[in-house]
Image: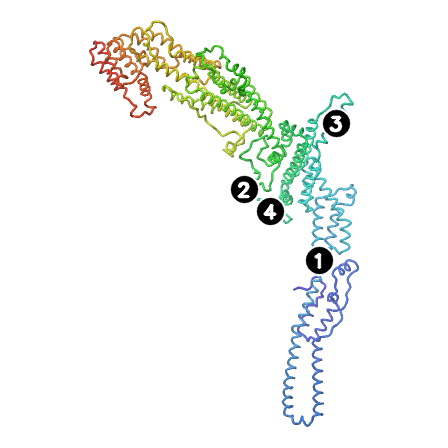
Amino acid sequence: MSVATGGQFSGSSADEVAISASSSPEVSGDYTHQQFESKYGEFLSSSFDAVQYAQRIAGSGTQNSKAQESGDGITQLMGTLASRADSLESLLKHTILRSHEELLQQVISVRAVDSSLGQIEDQVREIKSYMHGLRTKVRVPYEQALMYTRQAANLQAATACVRGTSKFIQLVRRLRAQIPDSALEGEGRADFPLAALTLLDIEKLVGGSALSGVRLVDQALADVVSVRRTLTMTEAERLVASGMQRAHQSDVAAGLQILFNLGTLPGAIAATVRRYTVEWAAHVAGRLEPKAVHAQVREHNAQATAGDGSDMIGITAVLWSRLEALVDELVSRGMELRALERVLARKRDVLPRFDVSVSALDSNASAGVSFLDLVVVQLGDRPLAFWWGTAIAALAAELDSACTESSVIRQTLINGYTRLVQLFLPKLEYILAPRLGGVVSVGPAESADAGSVVLVQSACVAPQMPHVLYGDPGPVVLWDRLLAKFETEYVKRAAARIEDAVGRCFPPPPPPGLLDAQEAWASQKPRVGAADISSAVPPPVDLMSGASPSRKLVAGVVRSITTELEMAKSDTRLGAAVAHAAAAAVASFVAASDAKLAAIVAANPGTLRLVESPLLAKYCVGLINAAESLRSGLAALCESEYGGSDSVAIAATTRLRQLQNDSNRHSHRRSRSSISLPSSPRPGSVASFAADSSSPPPSMAAIVRDVLNACEQDLLALISRQSDLLLGAADSVITESIISSDHVANSSDEPMEAPFESSMQWLQTQVLEPLETDYCRRPVSAMVDRYLCLYARVVCLTFPLSEAAKLRLTAEVTQFEFACSQLVAASASKAGSIAPKLADVGRSYRALRLVRPLLFTDIAELLTVVQGNMTVQLWSDLPLFDLVDHILCRVATELGDDTCKSAMPYALLGWSKRQWIEELIANDLADNVKRSSTQKANVRQVLAQSLDQLLATSSPTDLTQLLQAAKHAVSSK
């Protein structure tokens, strides 16, 4: 270990140490000891004080003192041993003189003892010699090394103290140069960032060394350092505060750099944010208190009354003015903290000088430590997020207190919720939008398992503005703590207003005691132009829940929905909630209509009751028209305000109905079931928003458009169900009247009403003409197509086919064609489109047109038709089996025998005409209808048997040729 540290040992010190280690310890050791004591005796003293020595050096120089000499302990021990040996020798002499005789007797023993003493003396001498060598080789070097070590430690402490004092003096001089005395008086210029670094170095130097007792250091700390540190801190806080207020990033950055250089950045910023929180809570307290609001109203109105009284105000005006003032202050403070946070996020210390875990704060450790990371570690969250949560909590508590104490304030805020939203969101856009440096939490929000707010854009979100998302932390706090309860109440009231409009469409039925009201309801007449088919008794009173909704009432529903959506259009979240409330109201409208329709069907089993009662038909048509009016109103609203209806979904619905109608084209009984509309997730639900997390969130127009489209589809389904009910009732009655009609039962020549005429007229006048929807156009066309085929088949089976029957059939065919054309025309759209014609039906209409010439075709021409020698375009539309049935009836009529009548196809099977017609229809649909083997009959085989039986009879040549040609045509088909 080196002892010489300050250059105070002379050049001969090493030689003196070597001489003292090799020469006599009594000569060289004493000499060396004297030399060291004369030079460095002061450092060997146990009362040496390094601080006093440093003060003496700094003041008047050094002083040396010599230490006193001390005796050698080992030498004293040897002297004591020698004295004891002399005492022993004198004792022996005394004993010999006193006991001479005894000693002589014991001379032998004495000699032995003497010899032993000689040996002991030799050993003692050897021990002395060994102890002397040990003292020379061990003890003296050890004492010297201990002395040198103590001396070196004292020298190092003195050197460190002197150097620290010297560095402190230099730092103080530098600090005075960076912040001159004139700057303390506000006249000179100061370099505060460099001064902050100097202050940090002084703080580290004083804290890491024992300079607190040096009078020079203490005086400089009190007179120079503390004053300039206070001035630097004041300047940094001034720069930060002024920069935050003026949104001047340079000033904020300069103040933050000074605080960082001072080493007080995290604590100072945390204290600033907490001070903002406390000041905001104090600012909000009592601002919305009902007593203060009423006091302001009274004071203002008293002053207004003293004047002309034109500017008198109420509680609502004062409340909104105070809220606007609070929001303005909230925006001002939030923008200040936003400016601070933006600068903190951009400032970094490339060479970190503080004990901070860089890897835990920033993934890019090579870029240094961000100032924001330091503040987050101290504060626990971002400054703006920390302040935002507490600020909204304080404002929410004030609003809750005001609403609890005053119902007027509560009603005002609920009714003016849209204004309340607009009061916050547009002004707070730059505070709420993370893209613009708004509220973003870095605390527990990063833990997805904790169920906290997700920092990134959420799956279940809806944008209010281009930069504000409902899934961001700022809007989440705002809605959950402040606006949620008002939004819920507002949506409930909006839903109640829409439900009231729907409820006015379905008033409750008259009480049982009000007979006048019941009679007035039951005496309502059908629409002008509608003919009463029967004077049937009206439905029971318990089924009458008032008239069907009028167009005015339905327009009130649309107007209510439009008004509520217009009031909520400024907020996507509120607009979606109101849209869903409107959808619920439409669903209740559909449910009420379905319930009334179900009640009518349950009270009127079968379909004939609906056809016979004009009142029931009018009521059902009124329900359909009301649903159509509501659908068209919602479609117009969607088209004008939200970019149109969902044409893809509506086109898919139309195509679905078309396929269903085509599949039932040739069936005699239509199976009217509700059409399953294509469904999609409800707008605003988690399923619709989470379908594609990468896609941007939908806008309010898209959400409302989807909801209105869903409502429109529900109404279309309602219209289709109710229309199918009426069409199904008419279809079954018309089909029954066509099949069961007996064209030859009455031989009277007087004109008679056809059996199908009344039911078809009911369908035209009571259903198709009053309906205001174009849904029935395609189903009616399919129904008329089937009626034409069915009627032509019934006419071909007429037996006996006398001349009077032919004339009646000719007139009836004309009536039937006119009635069918009226049905097709009545099913046309009410929107002014071109009315369809009966000829547009196609082949079935052309087949009906062939019935009249077929009735009066003679046998020769009929044989030519069967043989195919006539023009194909003229007779190709007539089905072969119907033609063969007509030939069989014609031949049987010509022969006029009962055996010929039994040769008819249905007679051979023991069936009625209805059963045979149903079999022909099933044969036409053989590819689409699955029939059991017991019900299935081979139409071709039965026709062949019927033709063979007629051929077996004695018939004229022309009839025989006709039957053979028909048999050949049937077998070769």
Badge 3 amino acid: Arg
Task: Please tell me whether mark 1 or mark 4 is closer to you in this view.
Answer: 4
Measured in 3D between alpha carbons, the distance from the residue under mark 1 to the one under mark 4, in whole angstroms, is 33 Å
Asked if disc 3 and disc 1 are in contact, CB closer than 8 Å, the reply is no
Q: Which residue is mark 1?
A: 160
Q: Which mark is residue 298?
A: 3
Q: Secondary structure at mark 3?
A: helix
Q: Which residue is mark 4?
A: 358
Residue 453 in the image: above or below residue 50:
above
Quadrant of the image containing the N terminus: bottom right
Going from the N terminus, do you reach mark 2 or mark 3 first?
3
The residue closer to the viewer here, 839 or 963, is 963
Q: Secondary structure at mark 4?
A: helix
Q: Which residue is mark 2?
A: 449
The residue closer to the viewer here, 1 or 143, is 143
Badge 2 amino acid: Asp
Task: Please tell me whether mark 2 or mark 3 is closer to you in this view.
Answer: 3
How many marks on residues? Answer: 4
